Amino acid sequence: MTVLYAAAAVFVALIIIAWLTPRAAMPRPPAESEPVQSPPGTPSDAAAFTATAEPSGTDAGAAGTTAPSSETQRNRTMHVAITVNGRRYERQVEPRLLLVHFIRDLGALTGTKVGCDTSQCGACIVLLDGMSVKSCTCLAVQADGCEVTTIEGLATGGELHPIQDAFWEKHGLQCGFCTPGMVFASHELLTHTPDPTDDEIRQGLEGNMCRCTGYQNIVRAVRHAADQMSERSRE
Protein backbone atom coordinates (compact mmCIF):
# COMPACT_ATOMS: atom_id res chain seq x y z
CA MET A 1 0.00 0.00 0.00
CA THR A 2 2.84 2.38 0.81
CA VAL A 3 4.22 1.91 -2.68
CA LEU A 4 0.84 2.72 -4.22
CA TYR A 5 0.51 5.90 -2.16
CA ALA A 6 4.01 6.95 -3.21
CA ALA A 7 3.29 6.35 -6.88
CA ALA A 8 0.04 8.33 -6.70
CA ALA A 9 1.85 11.21 -4.99
CA VAL A 10 4.50 11.27 -7.73
CA PHE A 11 1.83 11.23 -10.45
CA VAL A 12 -0.03 14.17 -8.88
CA ALA A 13 3.22 16.08 -8.50
CA LEU A 14 4.03 15.61 -12.17
CA ILE A 15 0.59 16.93 -13.16
CA ILE A 16 1.03 20.03 -10.99
CA ILE A 17 4.51 20.72 -12.41
CA ALA A 18 3.23 20.35 -15.99
CA TRP A 19 0.35 22.72 -15.28
CA LEU A 20 2.57 25.40 -13.74
CA THR A 21 5.24 25.27 -16.44
CA PRO A 22 4.77 28.19 -18.96
CA ARG A 23 3.48 26.92 -22.33
CA ALA A 24 4.68 28.15 -25.70
CA ALA A 25 2.32 30.66 -27.21
CA MET A 26 0.19 29.09 -29.93
CA PRO A 27 -0.20 31.17 -33.13
CA ARG A 28 -3.50 32.98 -33.20
CA PRO A 29 -5.52 32.40 -36.35
CA PRO A 30 -5.93 35.62 -38.32
CA ALA A 31 -9.20 37.42 -38.13
CA GLU A 32 -11.40 37.51 -41.19
CA SER A 33 -10.45 41.15 -41.78
CA GLU A 34 -6.69 40.50 -41.55
CA PRO A 35 -4.83 39.63 -44.76
CA VAL A 36 -3.11 36.27 -44.89
CA GLN A 37 0.64 36.73 -45.22
CA SER A 38 2.32 34.57 -47.79
CA PRO A 39 5.89 33.33 -47.41
CA PRO A 40 8.50 35.41 -49.26
CA GLY A 41 8.65 34.58 -52.96
CA THR A 42 5.20 32.94 -52.99
CA PRO A 43 2.41 34.56 -55.04
CA SER A 44 -0.64 35.55 -53.11
CA ASP A 45 -3.87 33.57 -53.38
CA ALA A 46 -5.48 36.37 -55.35
CA ALA A 47 -2.61 36.46 -57.82
CA ALA A 48 -2.62 32.68 -58.14
CA PHE A 49 -6.40 32.67 -58.68
CA THR A 50 -6.09 35.36 -61.30
CA ALA A 51 -3.36 33.44 -63.07
CA THR A 52 -5.33 30.17 -63.19
CA ALA A 53 -8.83 31.48 -63.76
CA GLU A 54 -8.10 33.88 -66.60
CA PRO A 55 -9.95 32.58 -69.69
CA SER A 56 -8.08 32.08 -72.91
CA GLY A 57 -9.37 31.24 -76.39
CA THR A 58 -12.10 28.63 -76.51
CA ASP A 59 -11.51 27.65 -72.85
CA ALA A 60 -13.27 30.72 -71.56
CA GLY A 61 -15.68 30.43 -68.67
CA ALA A 62 -19.40 30.09 -69.12
CA ALA A 63 -19.92 33.83 -68.94
CA GLY A 64 -17.64 34.45 -71.91
CA THR A 65 -18.30 31.38 -74.05
CA THR A 66 -19.33 31.64 -77.66
CA ALA A 67 -21.09 29.08 -79.83
CA PRO A 68 -18.73 26.73 -81.72
CA SER A 69 -18.01 27.94 -85.20
CA SER A 70 -19.31 26.07 -88.20
CA GLU A 71 -15.74 25.02 -88.91
CA THR A 72 -15.47 23.50 -85.42
CA GLN A 73 -18.75 21.66 -85.89
CA ARG A 74 -17.56 20.27 -89.21
CA ASN A 75 -14.40 19.03 -87.53
CA ARG A 76 -16.57 17.05 -85.10
CA THR A 77 -18.50 15.28 -87.87
CA MET A 78 -17.67 13.05 -90.81
CA HIS A 79 -18.97 13.12 -94.34
CA VAL A 80 -20.71 9.97 -95.53
CA ALA A 81 -22.38 9.00 -98.77
CA ILE A 82 -24.77 6.08 -98.39
CA THR A 83 -27.16 4.74 -101.02
CA VAL A 84 -30.45 3.71 -99.44
CA ASN A 85 -32.99 1.89 -101.63
CA GLY A 86 -31.30 3.20 -104.75
CA ARG A 87 -31.12 6.84 -103.62
CA ARG A 88 -27.81 8.40 -102.63
CA TYR A 89 -27.69 10.39 -99.40
CA GLU A 90 -24.76 12.59 -98.41
CA ARG A 91 -24.68 13.83 -94.84
CA GLN A 92 -22.39 15.20 -92.15
CA VAL A 93 -22.77 12.80 -89.22
CA GLU A 94 -21.24 12.29 -85.82
CA PRO A 95 -18.87 9.32 -85.75
CA ARG A 96 -21.00 7.68 -83.07
CA LEU A 97 -24.25 7.77 -85.12
CA LEU A 98 -25.72 4.31 -85.62
CA LEU A 99 -26.84 3.21 -89.06
CA VAL A 100 -30.37 2.53 -87.81
CA HIS A 101 -30.76 6.17 -86.73
CA PHE A 102 -29.25 7.40 -90.00
CA ILE A 103 -31.89 5.41 -91.88
CA ARG A 104 -34.84 6.44 -89.73
CA ASP A 105 -33.82 10.11 -89.69
CA LEU A 106 -34.00 10.28 -93.48
CA GLY A 107 -37.76 10.70 -93.31
CA ALA A 108 -40.26 8.04 -94.19
CA LEU A 109 -37.92 5.05 -93.83
CA THR A 110 -39.23 3.90 -90.46
CA GLY A 111 -39.71 0.25 -91.35
CA THR A 112 -36.32 -0.45 -89.77
CA LYS A 113 -37.14 -0.76 -86.07
CA VAL A 114 -35.19 0.01 -82.91
CA GLY A 115 -36.15 -2.86 -80.66
CA CYS A 116 -33.47 -3.50 -78.07
CA ASP A 117 -30.27 -1.50 -78.79
CA THR A 118 -28.28 -4.57 -77.75
CA SER A 119 -28.27 -6.64 -80.98
CA GLN A 120 -30.61 -9.23 -79.47
CA CYS A 121 -33.99 -8.87 -81.19
CA GLY A 122 -33.07 -8.46 -84.87
CA ALA A 123 -35.81 -5.91 -85.61
CA CYS A 124 -33.23 -3.52 -87.08
CA ILE A 125 -31.84 -5.86 -89.76
CA VAL A 126 -31.21 -4.36 -93.20
CA LEU A 127 -29.22 -5.45 -96.23
CA LEU A 128 -25.78 -3.86 -96.47
CA ASP A 129 -24.32 -4.54 -99.91
CA GLY A 130 -26.65 -7.55 -100.11
CA MET A 131 -25.74 -8.99 -96.71
CA SER A 132 -28.04 -8.82 -93.69
CA VAL A 133 -26.65 -6.78 -90.79
CA LYS A 134 -28.09 -5.50 -87.53
CA SER A 135 -28.08 -1.75 -88.06
CA CYS A 136 -28.22 -0.98 -84.34
CA THR A 137 -24.66 -2.25 -83.98
CA CYS A 138 -23.29 -0.76 -87.20
CA LEU A 139 -22.07 2.82 -87.38
CA ALA A 140 -23.19 5.04 -90.22
CA VAL A 141 -19.56 5.83 -91.07
CA GLN A 142 -18.96 2.09 -91.54
CA ALA A 143 -21.60 2.11 -94.28
CA ASP A 144 -19.97 4.98 -96.16
CA GLY A 145 -19.97 4.16 -99.87
CA CYS A 146 -22.25 1.15 -99.39
CA GLU A 147 -25.73 0.29 -100.60
CA VAL A 148 -28.42 -0.26 -97.99
CA THR A 149 -31.76 -1.92 -98.62
CA THR A 150 -34.54 -1.47 -96.08
CA ILE A 151 -37.89 -3.21 -95.97
CA GLU A 152 -39.35 -0.34 -98.00
CA GLY A 153 -36.97 -1.08 -100.85
CA LEU A 154 -37.31 -4.85 -101.04
CA ALA A 155 -40.42 -4.83 -103.21
CA THR A 156 -39.86 -3.99 -106.89
CA GLY A 157 -42.29 -2.37 -109.27
CA GLY A 158 -45.05 -2.36 -106.68
CA GLU A 159 -44.85 -6.16 -106.34
CA LEU A 160 -43.98 -7.74 -103.02
CA HIS A 161 -40.86 -9.84 -102.74
CA PRO A 162 -41.68 -13.57 -102.48
CA ILE A 163 -40.62 -13.56 -98.84
CA GLN A 164 -42.90 -10.63 -98.05
CA ASP A 165 -45.73 -12.31 -99.91
CA ALA A 166 -45.13 -15.58 -98.04
CA PHE A 167 -45.34 -13.86 -94.66
CA TRP A 168 -48.66 -12.40 -95.76
CA GLU A 169 -50.03 -15.67 -97.14
CA LYS A 170 -48.96 -17.85 -94.20
CA HIS A 171 -49.79 -15.33 -91.48
CA GLY A 172 -46.19 -15.10 -90.35
CA LEU A 173 -46.79 -11.81 -88.60
CA GLN A 174 -49.08 -10.33 -86.02
CA CYS A 175 -48.12 -6.90 -84.69
CA GLY A 176 -45.51 -6.58 -87.46
CA PHE A 177 -42.77 -5.00 -85.34
CA CYS A 178 -40.30 -7.84 -85.85
CA THR A 179 -41.36 -8.60 -89.45
CA PRO A 180 -38.77 -6.45 -91.32
CA GLY A 181 -35.96 -8.18 -89.45
CA MET A 182 -37.54 -11.60 -89.95
CA VAL A 183 -37.88 -10.96 -93.68
CA PHE A 184 -34.23 -9.97 -94.08
CA ALA A 185 -32.98 -12.84 -91.90
CA SER A 186 -35.01 -15.15 -94.13
CA HIS A 187 -33.55 -13.44 -97.19
CA GLU A 188 -30.03 -14.15 -95.92
CA LEU A 189 -30.95 -17.78 -95.20
CA LEU A 190 -32.54 -18.47 -98.58
CA THR A 191 -29.66 -16.79 -100.42
CA HIS A 192 -27.25 -19.39 -99.05
CA THR A 193 -29.69 -22.26 -98.46
CA PRO A 194 -32.41 -22.21 -101.14
CA ASP A 195 -34.15 -25.35 -99.86
CA PRO A 196 -33.81 -25.33 -96.07
CA THR A 197 -35.28 -27.82 -93.64
CA ASP A 198 -37.40 -26.65 -90.71
CA ASP A 199 -34.41 -26.99 -88.40
CA GLU A 200 -32.26 -24.92 -90.75
CA ILE A 201 -34.99 -22.27 -90.87
CA ARG A 202 -35.15 -22.09 -87.09
CA GLN A 203 -31.39 -21.89 -86.87
CA GLY A 204 -31.32 -19.12 -89.49
CA LEU A 205 -33.84 -17.10 -87.48
CA GLU A 206 -32.31 -17.68 -84.04
CA GLY A 207 -31.03 -14.09 -83.90
CA ASN A 208 -34.56 -12.69 -84.25
CA MET A 209 -37.22 -12.42 -81.57
CA CYS A 210 -41.00 -12.48 -82.03
CA ARG A 211 -43.27 -11.88 -79.05
CA CYS A 212 -46.55 -12.64 -80.84
CA THR A 213 -46.67 -15.62 -83.20
CA GLY A 214 -44.75 -18.38 -81.46
CA TYR A 215 -42.62 -18.80 -84.64
CA GLN A 216 -44.71 -21.64 -86.11
CA ASN A 217 -46.24 -19.56 -88.88
CA ILE A 218 -42.93 -17.80 -89.48
CA VAL A 219 -41.29 -21.15 -90.23
CA ARG A 220 -44.18 -22.01 -92.57
CA ALA A 221 -43.80 -18.64 -94.28
CA VAL A 222 -40.08 -19.14 -94.91
CA ARG A 223 -40.69 -22.63 -96.26
CA HIS A 224 -43.40 -21.27 -98.56
CA ALA A 225 -41.08 -18.48 -99.70
CA ALA A 226 -38.40 -21.04 -100.53
CA ASP A 227 -40.88 -22.98 -102.67
CA GLN A 228 -42.05 -19.85 -104.47
CA MET A 229 -38.52 -18.62 -105.17
CA SER A 230 -37.54 -22.08 -106.42
CA GLU A 231 -40.49 -22.11 -108.85
CA ARG A 232 -39.62 -18.65 -110.15
CA SER A 233 -36.01 -19.67 -110.74
CA ARG A 234 -37.20 -22.56 -112.93
CA GLU A 235 -39.46 -20.38 -115.07
Image (cartoon, grey):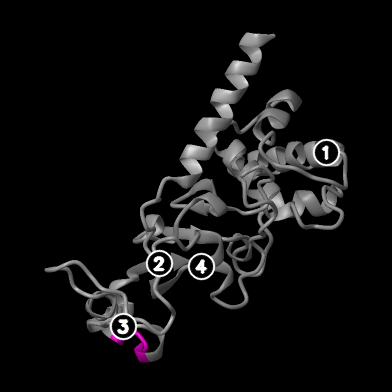
Q: Main secondary structure of the magenta part?
A: loop
Query: Residue at 62% across / 76% down in the picture?
Result: 108
| Residue type marked 2 | Arg
Tag 4 residue: 102
Which of these two is toward me, 33 or 113? Answer: 33
Disc 4 to disc 1, C-alpha distance: 30 Å
Quadrant hosting residue 152: bottom right
Query: Residue at 78% across / 42% down in the picture?
Result: 221
| Residue type marked 3 | Ala
| Residue type marked 4 | Phe
* Quarter in which the C terminus is drawn: top right
Tag 1 residue: 215
Q: Earlier in the sequence, mark 1 or mark 3?
A: 3
Local secondary structure at mark 2: loop
Q: Earlier in the sequence, mark 4 or mark 1?
A: 4
Tag 2 residue: 28
| Residue type marked 1 | Tyr
Quadrant hosting residue 185: top right
Tell me, yes or no, whether the two marked residues, 3 and 4, touch with CB atoms within 8 Å. no
Q: Earlier in the sequence, mark 2 or mark 4?
A: 2
Horizontal side, residue 199 vs residue 4: left or right: right
Quadrant hosting residue 111: bottom right
The magenta region covers 64-70
Q: Earlier in the sequence, mark 3 or mark 4?
A: 3
Q: Earlier in the sequence, mark 2 or mark 3?
A: 2
Tag 3 residue: 60
**Residue furthest to the front:** 2
Local secondary structure at mark 3: loop
Q: Is residue 199 magenta?
A: no
